[in-house]
């Protein structure tokens, strides 16, 4: 049986890796869908689809899981939720069950007649993309929460500096006339 796991992977962390290991006990092979593929360089989505694909493919290869996750596919968002499941299907090989942590995506798959698997959560307080991006911004330890391959990609693109620059420019964007300089 082929499964599909959709996430944004901003960035790919050790919790995602454990989710993949766990789902691979339920399916023969797993497609990894990179959601919101068109978005990068924002505080919630700092990394490009290509950067996220590199994080995931190198980690899966080094963990010996690449053979069971043969497709890593960027999936741009669509400005029409009712069409999204067919959009996903048009970009991916055939799958029988879709796994996602996003409640809207779960609903859309169910309404589209696709079986939905809810991924298990691993220590969500620590292993959360939001928490990791927060730690990058504040200069706290984030490296211990991600695979070494994610560290290599983030360092290779100076990703922490990118997030800090985005943070400064997003603050400027939201400043009102008369506010103090950031
Ligand atoms: P999300 O709403 O950002 O994530 C929901 C929660 O699920 C987050 O806490 C996330 O944790 C967690 N999560 C993400 N991937 C996970 C995984 N593999 N295993 C366990 N938990 C996971 O959305 P998302 O689930 O990352 O991605 C869904 C994608 O579908 C998004 O890109 C969304 O834009 C797309 N979508 C698009 C449309 C449309 O275009 N019309 C409609 C529905 C959904 P982390 O932050 O730690 O990853």
Image (tube, rainbow, N blue to C red):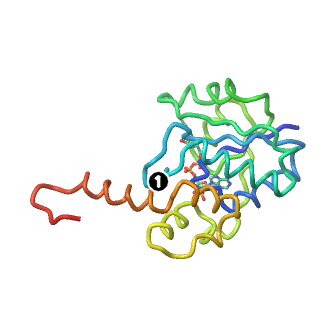
Res 99 → quadrant = top right
Local packing at callout 1 (Cα closer than 10 Å; few below 14, some 14-19, many 20+) is: some
Report the residue marked by disc 1.
Answer: 44
Image point 37% across, 58% down: which residue? 165
Residue 142, picture quadrant? bottom right
Q: Is residue 110 rendered to the left or right of residue 154?
A: right
Circle 1: element type: loop
Count the marks.
1
Relative to residue 137, is residue 169 drawn left or right?
left
The residue positioned farthest toward the bottom in the image shown:
140
The residue at label 1 has a CB less than 8 Å from ligand 1? yes
Residue that lies at the very extreme toward the front in this rendered image: 156
From the viewer's perspective, is 160 left or right of 94?
left
Q: Residue at x 32, y 60 (%)?
A: 168
Rendered view: 171 above or below 26: below
Residue 143 x/y as whole percent: 62, 70
Rendered residue at 88%/53% (across/down): 25
Residue toward you, 28 or 44? 44
* Residue 103 x %, y %: 59, 47
**In the depicted structure, whether residue 59 falls above or below residue 143:** above
Q: Where is residue 24 drawn, in percent x and y?
A: 85, 51
Image coords of residue 48 (percent x, y):
54, 44
Along the line of sight, the residue nearer the viewer: 178 or 89: 178
- Assign the N terminus to one quadrant of the image: top right
Q: Is residue 7 left or right of residue 70?
A: left
Q: Quadrant of residue 69?
A: top right
Quarter placement of the C terminus: bottom left
**As rendered, which of 134 and 80 lies closer to the eye?**
134
Q: Residue furthest left?
A: 178
Against 154, is 68 above or below?
A: above
């Amino acid at each position: 049986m082929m499964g599909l796991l959709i996430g944004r992977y901003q960035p790919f962390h050790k919790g995602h890796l454990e989710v993949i290991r766990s789902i691979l006990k339920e399916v023969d092979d797993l497609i990894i869908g990179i959601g919101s593929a068109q978005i990068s360089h924002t505080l919630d989505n700092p990394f490009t689809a290509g950067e996220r694909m590199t994080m995931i493919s190198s980690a899966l290869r080094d963990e010996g899981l690449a053979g069971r996750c043969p497709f890593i596919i960027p999936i741009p968002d669509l400005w029409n939720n009712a069409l999204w499941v067919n959009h996903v299907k048009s970009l991916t090989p055939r799958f029988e069950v879709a796994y996602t942590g996003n409640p809207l995506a779960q609903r859309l798959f169910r309404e589209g007649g696709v079986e939905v698997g809810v991924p298990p959560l691993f220590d969500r307080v620590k292993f959360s993309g939001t928490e990791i991006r927060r730690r990058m911004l504040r200069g706290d330890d984030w490296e211990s929460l991600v695979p070494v391959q994610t560290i290599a990609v983030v360092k290779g693109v100076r990703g922490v500096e990118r997030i800090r620059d985005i943070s400064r420019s997003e603050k400027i964007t939201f400043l009102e006339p008369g506010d103090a300089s950031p």
